[in-house]
Image (cartoon, rainbow, N blue to C red):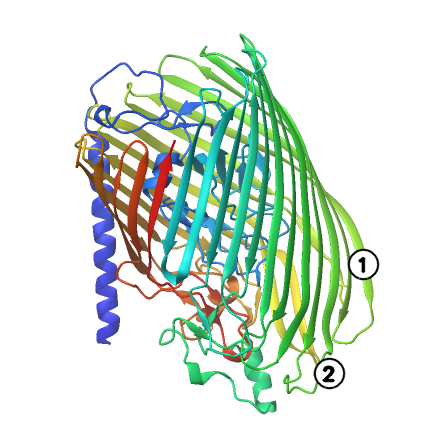
């Protein structure tokens, strides 16, 4: 009882302090601002001029982040360098009401559907064929190709929260991550070299070089290599290690044959190799494994000799190596012509990816299950045309269209090991399956904005979409006959958007918006059972916001309040069990079984009270729950999850930083930067929610609240930078996801560990 009361008191204090921070932020934004003339935004402003402005393209126009009536968090190249932002998880940690779990591999397919946990404002991929968010690289949607692309030679990152249907459309009902790479420049020969070495024998080398070929043509090349021995240790003598080897490169060209025409071409290549996932088991064995354990010669869990999390945070025992390879190619061509009153933009993108996984599958020292192969090939091709007005007149408009095709081919072989002990011969085919799927998407969109006065404007937009899905599948399941099935279905939608914006003065802007998000439906083909169709899911996001730059740009205070009404939520159900004949079955399906809602607040404060000191504070609070979900099919039976929290939707997300810089010579500055992050309790998938709802222990099904502190110190000049860092300074024990496929060793987690390193860069 004492422990429970202590936890309740801690949670109460955390909530009180967070609400105090919100109140303080509201008081700051209520201070009258002095009117001033606003100059055109510059990518970087001098420190003594106040807070650096960032130009974003959230509305497909270059605008100051403070002028865009969208909840967007942006990171410049300098921000990424100072905060050591290297992947999706790094910049999401500094974005309110965004949650991402650790994953066994960076991109491509993961070990289970629960592996990638990404959510914005509580909206995530609970199920369905498509994603709920878009990942764009230089305006090309790569969410089908790479979920966590390497951040190589970047210019800017934008995280747009809420549906962005008009311009981004596909897979944008929850929000969008827009990644803009550094463009070639004809201004001169330049480049940069970076190197890092850190804990776990982790090393990284990267660089970029810019070469002008003429007054109108320039090329830019960038490359990166990262290698590591791995954070976790395999205690089995023949099971292999946990190392990784990543390579990435980009070649880009910019040509400006006339003052009105700009041509950008780029090619991106990435190859990733992981030796093993290195998951640490918890010893909490699922109900299905518990049901078959009495009939086998070994006990469950198996590897008690090495211990389980949280006592054991680094050791595992896998009796066979695991090979995981992922590679992708992305090519983007952008042609932009801008006249005096009209501009035309064409964006052509092509991406292909290959994923291969084979080897260890039961994640224990026993030869229980084997994966002969899991091969996945994906392609994306799209063409987008935009025509829009040019200039700063009161009437602005954009019209356009896009056609895209995504293709995926997948094959998997799972067989029984020699120690399965459930009566199956070694090599018995548990599952051999293949499927081919294509999705052709066509859309037209338009948006108009009119300034009724110098202070008040109205924006109306909409997008009509048509998706056609084709799918064919064959399967052999538990020695049964080969079955084939195929199907085709189409879906249509119109998603509108309306925005009202009012400029209180040159420093304070107010906006209100309503926008619809949409994800097309589809069908599941199980050759052993009937076809299962599911419909589209929709949501409406209602939002009011305030953006302000105060005290001569010494303080930026942005606030957003939102309410999301989510209908016909596509929910994936995966149930493993035994049928009436004693055969093992794996039932999977998708249905529109639920409704949900999410409401919350987002506060972003950035202050530069002096030239030497910069402070940041981001806070997100949301209440995200299922509405009606009376027929949830889970590993714990068919239960009612109405009113339960949504997956990957913590109530609180908080991030803060403070950086102090001091001159140490005429050309050099020393800096010290501290960062603090807090995330409250969350669940990673529906099965984990069901586990706790049916009385199972919360561990490991619930991801408990955690706090993390990072520290950086270094010296920099205009040409070089040397820094040392420690992440998770106090070695907090937490995990951000639990994987429910742990078989004989129970559910698995990826524990947090302290990481440290030294990084240096040189610009020329």
Picture disc at residue 566 = none
Instruction: Say few, some or many: other residues with alpha carbon within 10 Å of mark 1 (under 14 / 14 to 19 / 20 or more).
Output: some
Q: Is residue 149 left or right of residue 156?
A: right
Residue 272, percent across and down? 56, 53
Residue that mark 2 sits on: 581
Residue 294 seen by the camera: yes
Question: Which residue sits at x=16%, y=32%?
Answer: 610
Residue situated in front as seen by the camera: 414 or 171: 414
Residue 633: horizontal and vertical position, in percent? 58, 66
Q: CA distance from mark 2 to mark 1?
A: 24 Å
Q: Quadrant of the N terminus?
A: bottom left
| Residue shown at the point (42%, 18%) measured from the top left | 457
Position of 373 with respect to 543 (left or right) is right
Q: Quadrant of the C terminus?
A: top left
Labels 2 and 1: the sequence-earlier one: 1
From the image, tell me which residue sits under label 1. 485
Percent position (x, y) of residue 596? 49, 51
Q: Residue at x 33, y 44 (%)?
A: 83
Picture quadrant where residue 493 is located: top right
């Amino acid at each position: 009882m004492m422990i429970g009361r202590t936890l309740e008191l801690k949670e109460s204090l955390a909530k009180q302090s967070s609400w105090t921070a919100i109140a303080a932020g509201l008081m700051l934004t209520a201070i009258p601002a002095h009117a001033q003339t606003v100059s055109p935004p510059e990518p970087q402003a001098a420190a003594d001029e106040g807070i650096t402005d960032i130009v974003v393209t959230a509305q497909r126009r270059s605008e100051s982040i403070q002028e865009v009536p969208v909840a967007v968090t942006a990171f410049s190249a300098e921000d990424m360098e100072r905060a050591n932002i290297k992947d999706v998880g790094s910049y999401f940690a500094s974005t309110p009401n965004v949650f991402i779990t650790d994953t066994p591999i960076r991109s491509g397919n993961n070990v289970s559907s629960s592996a990638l946990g990404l959510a914005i404002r509580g909206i995530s991929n609970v199920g369905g064929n498509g994603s709920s968010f878009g990942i764009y690289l230089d305006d090309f949607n790569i969410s089908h190709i790479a979920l966590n692309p390497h951040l190589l030679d970047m210019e800017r990152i934008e995280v747009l929260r809420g549906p962005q249907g008009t311009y981004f459309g596909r897979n944008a009902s929850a929000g969008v991550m827009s990644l803009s790479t550094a463009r070639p420049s004809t201004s001169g020969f330049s480049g940069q070299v970076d190197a890092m070495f850190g804990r776990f024998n982790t090393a990284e080398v990267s660089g970029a070089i810019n070469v002008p070929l003429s007054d109108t043509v320039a090329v830019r090349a960038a490359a990166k290599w990262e290698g590591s021995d791995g954070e976790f240790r395999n205690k089995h003598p023949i099971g292999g290690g946990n190392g990784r080897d990543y390579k990435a490169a980009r070649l880009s060209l910019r040509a400006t044959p006339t003052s009105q025409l700009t041509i950008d071409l780029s090619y991106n290549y990435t190859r990733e190799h992981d030796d093993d996932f290195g998951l640490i088991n918890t010893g909490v064995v699922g109900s299905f494994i518990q049901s078959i354990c009495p009939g086998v010669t070994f006990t469950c869990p198996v590897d008690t000799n090495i211990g389980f999390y949280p006592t054991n945070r680094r050791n595992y025992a896998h009796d066979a190596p695991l090979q995981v390879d992922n590679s992708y190619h992305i090519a983007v061509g952008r042609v932009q012509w801008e006249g005096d009153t009209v501009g035309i933009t064409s964006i052509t993108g092509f991406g292909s990816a290959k994923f291969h996984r084979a080897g260890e599958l039961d994640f224990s020292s026993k030869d229980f299950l084997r994966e002969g192969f899991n091969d996945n090939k994906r392609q994306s091709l799209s063409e987008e045309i935009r025509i829009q007005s040019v200039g700063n007149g009161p009437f602005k408009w954009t019209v356009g269209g896009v056609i895209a095709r995504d293709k995926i081919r997948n094959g998997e072989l799972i067989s029984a090991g020699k120690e399965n002990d459930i009566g199956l011969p070694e090599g018995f085919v548990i599952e051999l399956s293949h499927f081919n799927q294509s999705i052709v998407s066509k859309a037209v969109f338009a948006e108009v904005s009119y300034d009724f006065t110098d202070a008040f404007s109205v924006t109306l937009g909409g997008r009509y979409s048509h998706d056609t899905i084709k799918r064919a599948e064959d399967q052999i399941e538990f020695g049964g006959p080969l079955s084939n099935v195929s199907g085709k279905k189409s879906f249509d939608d119109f998603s509108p958007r309306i925005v009202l914006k009012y400029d209180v003065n040159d420093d304070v802007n107010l906006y209100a918006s309503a926008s619809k998000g949409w994800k097309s439906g589809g069908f599941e083909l199980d050759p052993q059972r009937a076809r299962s169709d599911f419909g589209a899911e929709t949501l409406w996001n209602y939002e009011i916001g305030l953006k302000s730059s105060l005290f001569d740009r010494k303080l930026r205070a942005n606030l957003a309040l939102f309410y999301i009404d989510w209908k016909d939520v596509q929910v994936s159900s995966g149930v493993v069990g035994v049928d009436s004949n004693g055969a093992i079955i794996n039932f999977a399906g998708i249905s529109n079984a639920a409704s949900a809602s999410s409401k919350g607040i987002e506060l972003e404060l950035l202050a530069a009270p002096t030239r030497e000191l910069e402070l940041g504070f981001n806070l997100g609070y949301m209440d995200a729950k299922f509405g009606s979900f009376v027929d949830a099919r889970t590993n714990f039976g068919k239960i009612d999850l109405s009113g339960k929290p949504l997956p990957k939707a913590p109530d609180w997300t908080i991030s803060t930083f403070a950086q102090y810089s001091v001159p140490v010579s005429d050309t050099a500055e020393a800096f010290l930067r501290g960062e603090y992050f807090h995330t409250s309790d969350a669940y990673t998938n529906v099965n984990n929610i069901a586990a706790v709802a049916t009385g199972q222990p919360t561990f490991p099904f619930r991801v408990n609240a955690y706090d993390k502190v990072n520290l950086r110190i270094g010296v920099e000049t205009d040409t070089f930078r040397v820094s040392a860092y420690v992440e998770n300074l106090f070695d907090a024990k937490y995990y951000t996801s639990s994987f429910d496929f742990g078989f004989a060793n129970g559910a698995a987690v990826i524990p947090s560990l302290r990481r440290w390193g030294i990084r240096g860069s040189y610009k020329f």
